[in-house]
Amino acid sequence: MEVSDEIISKSIDDYINRKIYVSLSLDDLQSLSDTEIEGAIIDHITECKVKDNYKKEYKIVKSLSKGMQNVYATWWLEAEVNNWGFNQYFYNSTGQFAEEARDWYAAMWAEKMAQIVDSAIQTLLSEQDLFIKTKKSWTLEAFSDSYKETKLGECDNKFYEIEKEISNLRLIYIRNNLWEFITENNWKIKTWWKFW
């Protein structure tokens, strides 16, 4: 299927003009489609909580509900690995959530994915010198060259083989645990009865 400039332009406009939820109510979450809900949660965390404060990103995200932490950790892992692999994931700030992502996959019976993430973590630890050297130089050339030396590509290939198997796992978790994503302070008073 060929993608026209018009479709690309509309997609970009939709993204730029999307609603960013400063707070998330039960009504908001229930009204969002399956394709919208994940993005609304990620946008809320990234745009309203973390903002551009990446030095405190870990502390900020860890202060959120367990559901928010799990969605953030796994969504970013999958986005980064699908972009340029585990190598990129670990070089970006979201790589610091690798253990949380691994643990969530294991808790959600996505054992193969948990093993792949664990293997990537172990590979990173065994290649610590390469990681530190590349991080210190902080150049695009050094980063590109690191792909020639790292063995993380093996983990990428395993990830791509099974990612489709877990694509709906996070969505099912969100839908079954909406209360973990409600951010309005008075949600318990207004909506407790909706859970019965």
Image (spheres, rainbow, N blue to C red):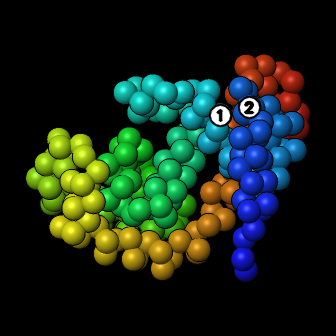
CA distance for labels 2 and 1: 6 Å
Which residue sits at x=65%, y=34%?
A: 44
Q: Quadrant of residue 103?
A: bottom left
Q: Can you tell which mark lies on residue 44?
A: 1
Q: Circle 2 — which element?
A: loop
Locate residue 48 relative to residue 132 in the image: left or right.
right
Which residue sits at x=21%, y=62%?
A: 145
Locate residue 27 relative to residue 159 in the image: left or right.
right
Q: Quadrant of the C terminus?
A: top right
Locate residue 35 relative to residue 132 in the image: left or right.
right
Q: Position of residue 48 (x, y in %)?
A: 62, 26
Kind of residue at disc 2: Tyr
Locate residue 43 relative to residue 6 in the image: left or right.
left
Name the residue at the left extreme.
Answer: 129
Q: Position of residue 125 (x, y in %)?
A: 19, 56
Which residue sits at x=44%, y=72%?
A: 159
Q: Circle 1 — which element?
A: helix
Name the residue at the front extreme.
Answer: 5
Q: Quadrant of residue 166?
A: bottom right
Q: Position of residue 147 (x, y in %)?
A: 26, 65
Which residue sits at x=63%, y=57%?
A: 170
Q: Can you tell which mark lies on residue 21?
A: 2
Q: Residues within 10 Å of mark 2 (few under 14, many from 20)?
A: some
Q: Position of residue 136 (x, y in %)?
A: 17, 41
Q: Quadrant of the N terminus?
A: bottom right
Kind of residue at disc 1: His
Q: Quadrant of residue 29?
A: top right
The answer to the question of whether label 2 and label 1 lie on touching residues, with beta carbons closer than 8 A, is yes
